Amino acid sequence: APRIGVLALQGDVREHVAALAAAGADARPVRRPAELDAVDGLVIPGGESTTISKLADIFEMREPIDKRIAAGMPVYGSCAGMIMLAAEVLDGRPDQRGFQGIGMTVRRNAFGRQVDSFEAPVRLDGVDGGPFHAVFIRAPWVERVDDGVEVLGRVTDGPAADRIVAVRQGNLLATSFHPELTGDPRLHRYFVDLVRAA
Ligand code: GLN
């Protein structure tokens, strides 16, 4: 089984480890450079991107992760993890910094503070079996992507209709929402397949 780490600095680590294991991966939390060396792919969980950014420096994980990404390691970022994979962040803290990432601009907490959390169906390109029941929690959306970034999913209706909420660029995958919270294994399976193929 492919060995996949979940970056365990802050956020919903356990949920991703469980979802990856259910999708057929040998999943474990990763907090140290030596632990990163032992995995073939990485998930950056939901949580708080400003905190994950700070802890990435404190735990000396920033450079090792940048290097692995440059070398082609598959990474999936969910919510705060999507923010950590974005080349540009709007409404971020001035000192927060992402990893070498996806050519896109994301807006933090984009869906508005009155509607902190909501759920909506999202159809994903390349994922069969009908729309995802997507859960958004103070989620970012994607405002712009470079050529070469594949848009996998958008919100279908409501005030945020057409906003991009799932993307892929090569071996990097990101969603605004949290598939690890809903028991739908399809997105983790998609990522496990990506790690297997890499
Ligand atoms: N608002 C958080 C951030 O900016 C993301 C929220 C989440 O991951 N559920 O990092």
Image (cartoon, rainbow, N blue to C red):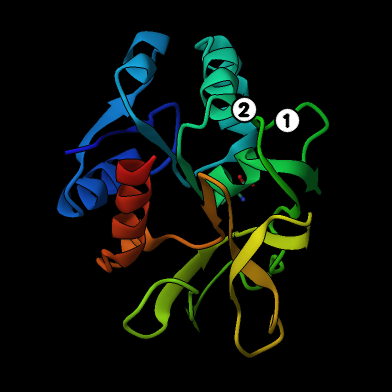
Q: Residue at x 50, y 74 (%)?
A: 125
Q: Residues within 10 Å of mark 1 (few under 14, many from 20)?
A: some
Viewer-closest of 58 and 19: 19
Q: In what element is the residue under mark 1?
A: loop
Left or right of 151: which side holds 42? Answer: left
In the image, what residue occupies the spot 75% across and 55% down?
A: 107
**Pointer 1 or 2: first along the chain:** 2
Kindly identify the amino acid type of the residue bearing the numbered disc 2. Ser
* Residue with the most extreme front position: 197
Asked if disc 1 is less than 8 Å from ligand 1, the answer is: no
User: Circle 2: is it few (<14), some (14-19), or many (20+) Cα within 10 Å?
Assistant: many
Which residue: 52% across, 66% down? 136
* Residue with the mark numbered 2: 53
- Image: 170 above or below 175: above
Q: Residue 138's x, y, as percent?
A: 60, 59
Secondary element under disc 2, as helix, strand or loop, is: helix
Indicate the position of residue 185 as horizontal and vertical percent values. Answer: 26, 64
Q: Position of residue 165 (x, y in %)?
A: 60, 66
Could you tell me if the residues under marks 1 and 2 are in contact, i.e. CB atoms within 8 Å?
A: yes
Identify the image quadrant of the N terminus: top left
Residue beneath disc 1 = 96
Seen at 38% across and 19% down, the residue is 36
Left or right: residue 191 compared with residue 86? left
Q: Amino acid at mark 1?
A: Gln
